[in-house]
Amino acid sequence: SKEKNKKKKTREGEDIASKEKTVSAVVDKTRKVEKQAEAKSSQSRTFDSGLAIEELALGKPNGKKASPGKQVSVHYIGKLQKNGKIFDSSGGKRPFKFRLGVGEVIKGWDVGVNGMRVGDKRRLTIPPSMGYGAKGAGPQIPPNAWLMFDVELVDVR
């Protein structure tokens, strides 16, 4: 009878151990799925031109939408992708205003700001062909520089 009790306890222990393994496998799978969902929810897309748009934050779903011909106001920080050096920013100033889609700004902005809603924040990674190209811009932006802008849409008129 002592032998039977030992075997019974061993089996119960094995059952508990295998249940724990099953539970931890399920938890691991769930974590993987959650991580994949997080990766997808930080919506980013890259165009054939090399332009990459990453959604950092979403404004109101019914907020005014930036579209070609509209005057938009944005806050932004511009950095060189190569070394992260900030070359321009609207911080502490009035928002920067421009008419979207008519060539008042670099092509990367005309394409990258289009479709944003007020309150949206995006990171635009802009190839030289949609930025300042082989000429660069002044002492701050070297020739053929890839640019990164964090842009927040403040208003659309």
Image (tube, rainbow, N blue to C red):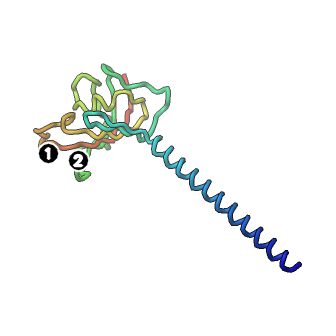
Residue that label 2 marks: 80
Q: Nearer the viewer, residue 41 or 25?
A: 25
- Residue shown at 31%/43% (left/top)? 91
Q: Report the disc number at residue 66.
A: none
Q: Residue at x 37, y 25 (%)?
A: 66
Q: Residues within 10 Å of mark 1 (few under 14, many from 20)?
A: some
As drawn, which residue projects farthest toward the top?
Answer: 69
Disc 2 or 1, which lies upstream in sequence? Answer: 2
Q: Residue 69 in the image: x percent, y percent?
A: 30, 19
Is residue 10 shown left or right of residue 157?
A: right
Q: CA distance from mark 2 to mark 1?
A: 9 Å
Q: Badge 1 is on which residue? A: 142
Residue shown at the point (83%, 79%) measured from the top left: 3
Residue 27 or 156: which is nearer the viewer?
27
Q: Position of residue 27 (x, y in %)?
A: 61, 55
Q: Crowdedness of circle 2 by 10 Å Cα count: few (<14), some, many (20+)?
A: many
| Image quarter (top left, top right, bottom left or bottom right) of the N terminus | bottom right
- SS label for mark 2: strand
Apparent side of residue 39 relative to residue 94 in the rendered image (left or right) = right
Determine which quarter of the picture holds residue 109: top left
Q: Is residue 143 left or right of residue 1?
A: left
Tag 2: amino acid: Leu
Looking at the image, residue 60 sits to the left or right of residue 80; the answer is: right
Single out the residue that lies furthest toward the right.
1
Evaluate if marks 2 and 1 touch, with contact meaning CB atoms under 8 Å apart.
yes
Q: Which amino acid type corresponds to the residue marked 1 in the rendered image?
A: Pro
